[in-house]
Amino acid sequence: MQNFYAMSVSIPFFSNYWHLITRLGEVQYLLPAALGVCLVLIRSDGTRLLAVRWLQTLLIAAFITLASKIAFIGWGIGSARFNFTGVSGHAMFAASIVPLLVATLASRFPQGWQKLAVFLSFALVLLVGVSRVAVGAHSASEVIAGLLLGSTASAMAIAHKGLPRGSWNQYVPMVVLAWLVLAPFQTPQLPTHSLVTWSALQLSGHAKPYTRTDMMREHHARTARQPASDLKGKPFSTG
């Protein structure tokens, strides 16, 4: 991930548009499109179970992501060794939603073309993940965790019933495509981090949120106090 990021920042297009690319993983952008497509899938007997499984796996992935963030902010449960403070929500939502959106939009194409479209969608998902590192929002470990979690969710939905095959009025893909193209420029950014922080403080009863800076400062303080000889052969302590 870090090597890919190092190469991509040297490409003018990527370096100039990271902040736009990263918006492609926002929940207020992806979730309405996913819910809209699920409503279409549920109406057909052949794709109803796929829609249900997709919503189930998406809900589980979202819960794990939220729990990891609350655990760190509220109780400091993370890893200084891997610079991990919680699963990247942008990476998770992109990986769990984009491939199935693309698969549904391409469901009227020959199956070979549909599979190619899904494969290319994962390349876009990876780009969204790299953008989170590029804009300084997440570490590589947090993005990788989000990509793995989201990809598992979408893969489980597809494995249950296969790629969606169906035919519906052309207005469906047109509306979804219009949303996907225009929404990053129109939808406001939601204060999701503030809401998660407030929830973590309410649940933990702490007055201040635990931060990455706190974790790394405590980690450096522990390693500075511990003799170098004691560090050899011992497992790394996480913050």
Image: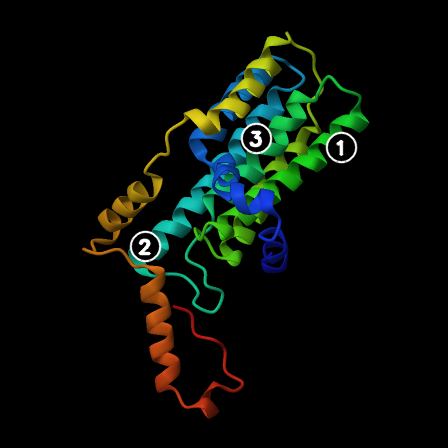
Q: In the image, which is nearer the foreground, mark 2 or mark 3? A: 2
Residue at the top extreme of this rendering? 169
Q: 106 or 156: nearer the eye?
A: 106
Q: Earlier in the sequence, mark 3 or mark 1?
A: 3
Disc 1 is placed on an element classified as helix
Q: Say which amino acid is labelled 3.
A: Trp
Q: Are marks 2 and 3 in contact (CB under 8 Å)?
A: no
Residue for point 50% across, 52% down: 133
- SS for tag 2? helix
Could you classify mark 3 by the number of other residues whose Cα lies within 10 Å: few (under 14), some (14-19), or many (20 or more)? many
Residue labelled with disc 1:
116
Q: Which residue is mark 2?
A: 73
Q: Quadrant of residue 84?
A: bottom left
Label ID, residue 54: 3
Q: Quadrant of the C terminus?
A: bottom left
The answer, for residue 149, to whether it is visible in the render is no
